[in-house]
Image: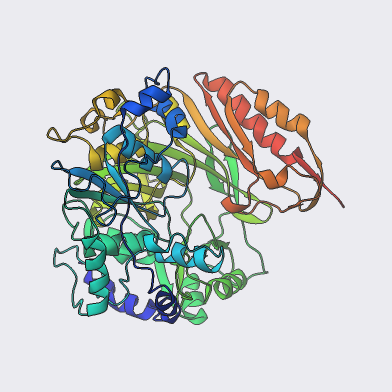
Amino acid sequence: SHGSSTNYIKANKNDNNHEMKTLRKQWATIPAVPSIEYPPDVQSIHQEHDTLASTLGDFDDLQQTPTHNPQFANTDKNTGNNNESKSTTKAIILMDAFSPYHGQYIAHAARHLYGAAVIHVASDFFARYLFQVEGQMDHLSSRLPDLSDLDFGAHGNNNGSGIANGSDVEAKGEIQIWKSGLPSNIQICGIYCESDSGLEDAERFGVALGLYPRFHDGFDKARRDKFLMNEVVKSVCGLEVVQQQSCENLEEALEFARKLGVVEDEEEIIGRENLDAEKRKVRITTQRKMVVVKPPRGVASDDVHLCSNLASVRMAFDKVHHSPVFGSPTSSKHERVLLQEFASGVEYAVDVVCKDGERKVAALWRYDKRSANGAPFVYFGTELVSAAENEKEVERAVCEYVFKALEALSVRWGISHVEVIADEVDGRIRVRLVEVNCRQHNTDFSPLTNACIGYGALDMVLAAHLGGDEHYNYPPEMERFRLNWDSVPTMPSIRAKGAILHFVSYVEGKISRIRHDVLEEIEGLDSVMDMHIYPQFLEEGNEISKTVDIRSDTGWAHLMNDDEIEFRRDYDRIVELMKDMFEVKE
């Protein structure tokens, strides 16, 4: 375990679990039990489709196939069908699997391609949200068993010690009740968590089920806390990271900002500006010293502030301090605020899939973040780049850094989305960590990666957890759809240029006109393979706001072209056209 930050964890811990305990009492009459979907009769797929697609990418078209076979759906020991089969059935636990292009794709592919069962579980956050906000109760039997009183230690069981001091009989009883609902022939081969809010629950659940270390990475807070992850990456592997401090009060924050060279000045926040449209390199517009202020637990640049003076540090600290912890199922607040040295350079995201410690890059992305509407880090584009042997040294250095960071955090199974900043110092490439996310890239990336690379991260997850067992009875009819893990290279190369463009709104108010001529021009560009405007922005009179983060954009476009000149031309044209998509009432 990583013992150096134990005091930080204790200081940052919020013990306000009263609300979840109250809810669990309300739910006590509905026991948490395994919600299992069994593999269907694969032959039925042939009967429903005249022809089958011939590539993994084309398998997306089969997702409309009904995923519930009456012979198998929701069967367990109490309802009786096929649970006592003599052969083992592989299974994967899917937590918070709501997205049709993430968790639901994995559920469908696991059952149809691999002949595996899928066990659905709702994290504490989503169980509470669906119950309190949406007024739903159907999901309660699929909720996570109560793990709140089990002691996982400061960092958990990366030293193989298992659950420490888990003495609460009732909580242990819920786990045992859940496990007793599993048919004896089910073999759980891993956990896939789609949501950021469920990641800690997924780690705790895996430990409680005894999946560590054969199919699971154990429990470690450093995989979610941005301060801890940087400290661990630096101390365990000696990797370069930004200077940082976890601040309990404003005085500590101002002292650290002064240490970095931030000075008292008029109230302003300097943003980023893209100065190199060709290479999408993000550069800072000034040489003034700056500091990043953000919550230690967050997502998608939410509440991330780039401060150029002490006045803006004060504002940012006050906004983050005591703000709700992202994804917390309780009313937890941020007791500390993270300040980090601003790292200028090019930002990359690396999607990695691990199989028992063997790491492979599924996709390498270069971010195009710019200042817009007063916000410093607005996503404009996410572009696929190659990491193959003959590619640029910087891309290779980025991937190698990410592999070491995942090793430091003991990530040996499943999918990760890791963000870093790369620049050049004294003639050498310097890579520093932004954050590690132990979940998928939160966008519909599969169409692009399948087209530009030939495979994708989700198919790699399935191959890692469910594939490669020569003794398992995989559906033979689906062999050509299954990805062979051993055939996937460690580093991907691209066969066409590809990018996701995020539509940025520059207006705010009630929509008075939707520029369909602009939308039609974008759709007609040679590089555009797909585009989508969110429905709320397709009706006049609806409210629209200026885009300041990934949650406030208005839609997206997927670009792909094997001609780089045409690709760049279309990319730049769309960025210009974004400004004229909507008009609002003055």
Is residue 266 or residue 187 the one in the foreground?
187
Is residue 350 or residue 149 the one in the foreground?
149
Does residue 231 show up?
no
Q: Position of residue 71 (x, y in %)?
A: 32, 41
Is 73 on the left or on the right of 503, as rendered? left
Does residue 330 show up?
yes
Residue at 36% of width from left, 23% of height from top? Answer: 46
Q: Position of residue 356 (x, y in %)?
A: 19, 46
Establish if 355 lies above or below 240. above
Establish if 192 lies above or below 106. below
Residue at 32% of width from left, 36% of height from top? Answer: 40
Q: Quarter-wise, where is residue 573 in the image?
A: top right
Q: Position of residue 49 (x, y in %)?
A: 42, 22
Is 485 on the left or on the right of 396, as rendered? left
Establish if 252 lies above or below 183. below
Is 157 on the left or on the right of 418, as rendered? left
Is 13 on the left or on the right of 444, as rendered? left
Give the residue at the far right of this rendering.
Answer: 586
Which quadrant of the figure contains the N terminus? bottom left
Is residue 89 or residue 75 the one in the foreground?
75
Is residue 418 or residue 206 the one in the foreground?
206
Q: Position of residue 238 (x, y in %)?
A: 25, 57
